[in-house]
Each structure stands twice: as C-alpha cells, then as structure tokens.
Image (cartoon, rainbow, N blue to C red):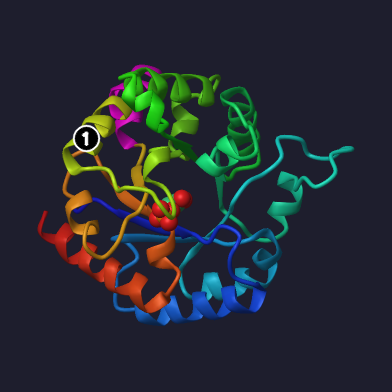
Amino acid sequence: MQKKLYIGTNTKMYKTIRQTVAFLDELGSLTRDIDRNLLELFVIPSYTALDAAARTAQAQAITLGAQNMSWEDEGQFTGEVSPLMLEETGVRLVCIGHSERRHIFGEDDEVENKKVLAALRHHFTPLLCVGETASQKELGIQNEVLRSQLKVGLHDTSPEQARHIWIAYEPVWAIGVGGTPAGVMYASRMYTVIRQTLREIYGGEAGDRIPILYGGSVNNMNARELIQAPDIDGLFIGRSAWDADNFSRIIHDLVDICLIK
Ligand code: 13P
C-alpha cells in the first residue's frame, strides 16, 4: 500500500488572520487535485488566526495545528494558551518543542513531556520536534541528544497513544535564515536513530507506525532528495512554504516522487 506523505508548514510569527485565511484558501485550491488519502497536508499558523482559519482549513482538507500549548487546563499562567482553548478552535495538531521554543524560550524535555501528555489527554496529535544543536553535532553526541529528547519527551506515553504521535527531526543548525539544510546521508542516519528509539520505547509495530518528518531549510532544490530516505515520512517546512504557489510546487513534486518511490 502507498504510504501517506506528511507535508506541512509552521508559519511562525508571520501572517495575520486575514493573510492566514487567504493562504489556506489558495493552498487548498492549488492542491485540490491531490488525493488526501495519499497526502496529510497541515498548516500551523499563529494562535490568533486559528479560530478564523478553522472553517477554511476544513473546507480545503488541510489539518490545522497550534504552534505551542500549555500543559495546564487553566490557572494563573499569564500569556499561556490552554488545551481547552485550543479545543474550541478545531485544532487537531499541536507542535511541541519546536527548536525556537527550546532555544529562545528555554523549554526543556521535561516541559515538552508535560505538553505531550496534555495534548494526548485532550485528543490532539502532538508533533514533537527534536534535533541537536551545532555544538552537540560537533561533539558527536547527536545520537545521544535525540535519544534523550525522545525518551524524556515521550515518557509515560503508551503504544496505544503512539498512534497519535508525530515526530519532526529538525536539527537546530539547519533551521531558519542562516541555517544549512542537512545532507541526505546525515539526515538518514538520524532518522534511523529516531526510528530505533521509537521501537525501543513502544515496540516494533507501534514504533514503526509513527511518522517522522524532516524540517530545516527545506526548499524546491532539496525537498526531493530529502524525502528519498527509507525512514522518512514527510517534510515540515518554514520559509519555502509561506508562498502558497511555491509550497504547492514542492508538494506536487514530492507527491510525484513518492508515488514512484
Ligand atoms: P525553515 O524551513 O525556514 O528553516 O524552518 C523550518 C521550521 O522551523 C519548521 O518548523
């Protein structure tokens, strides 16, 4: 059976409500020809756009996600957004532990674990992001870093819950302006480390089912190459996806490749 391809974007702190809705509309029309049984297309906009974007996303068969979430349902946590609030917006996916959350806002693996557990409790799909920094890579401890991010981040989750978990491998040195995309060989080795760790945590069958996505300076030139590795299920794209027309070109390219993979 043809494996499903996961492709999505996180619009970070870009796009207003109006821009997000227009983006979803355009992206939906440009990708309408692609069978959604083959493609899981997701967009993760800013919190303020979620409510307005929900109806458009649904009409366009695009899964909507939130960029972050509190692990608490309610309380005295100024500036946080609770899972109960996200439930009201129709969000299905929650991005947890994005490298910008970890490295700019100081979130650690224990915090990500609380968020993963809260997301599962509220029937969201947590998209847990993992990835080593440049200095961890230089020290040669990338395997250990990924293994501990996964083991701590997914602590106390069951093989049954693993059905709803997605993982994004996003090396910190590859993300954003000034990032260098990971080489295919290197990324493939890291997907294998991630896959083996997921098997260790959940057992073979449940571990094998979890989609692993790559993110970090994906563009029109390298997307085809990056999707070719055996353990990869999709791509999580920033800058190159924010123009719907360009994103649609990447998606069509990847769908063509994966149909013959
Ligand atoms: P870029 O593709 O802009 O490097 O961002 C990737 C990312 O952070 C996806 O979450």
At a point 62% along the width and 39% down the height, the residue shown is: 119
Residue 1 shows in the view: no
How packed mark 1 is, by other alpha carbons closer than 10 Å (few <14, some 14-19, many 20 or more), is: few
| Left or right placement of residue 43 versus residue 54 in this view | left
Residue 260 shows in the view: yes
Q: Is residue 227 magenta?
A: no
| Left or right placement of residue 255 versus residue 164 in this view | left
Could you say where residue 50 lies in the image, as x and y percent from the top left?
Answer: 65, 64
Find numbered disc 1 in the image and state the secondary structure of the residue it sits on: helix
At a point 69% along the width and 53% down the height, the residue shown is: 87
Residue 114: which quarter of the image? Answer: top right
Relative to 121, does residue 6 appear above or below in the rendering? Answer: below
Q: Is residue 197 magenta?
A: yes
The mark total stands at 1
Q: Cβ(mark 1) to ligand 1 < 8 Å?
A: no
Q: Give the farthest residue toward the left.
A: 260
Residue, disc 1: 186
Residue numbers of the magenta segment = 195-209
Q: Mostly what secondary structure, the magenta segment? A: helix
Could you say where residue 84 lies in the image, as x and y percent from the top left?
Answer: 75, 48
At a point 38% along the width and 65% down the height, the residue shown is: 240
Relative to 66, does residue 182 appear above or below in the rendering? Answer: above
| Left or right placement of residue 218 versus residue 98 in this view | left
Could you say where residue 165 lies in the image, as x and y percent from the top left?
Answer: 46, 38
The amino acid type found where label 1 is placed reads Tyr
Relative to 68, does residue 189 appear above or below in the rendering? Answer: above
Could you say where residue 94 lies in the image, as x and y percent from the top left?
Answer: 57, 47
105 and 76: which one is in front?
105
At a point 26% along the width and 65% down the height, the residue shown is: 220
Residue 61: which quarter of the image? Answer: bottom left
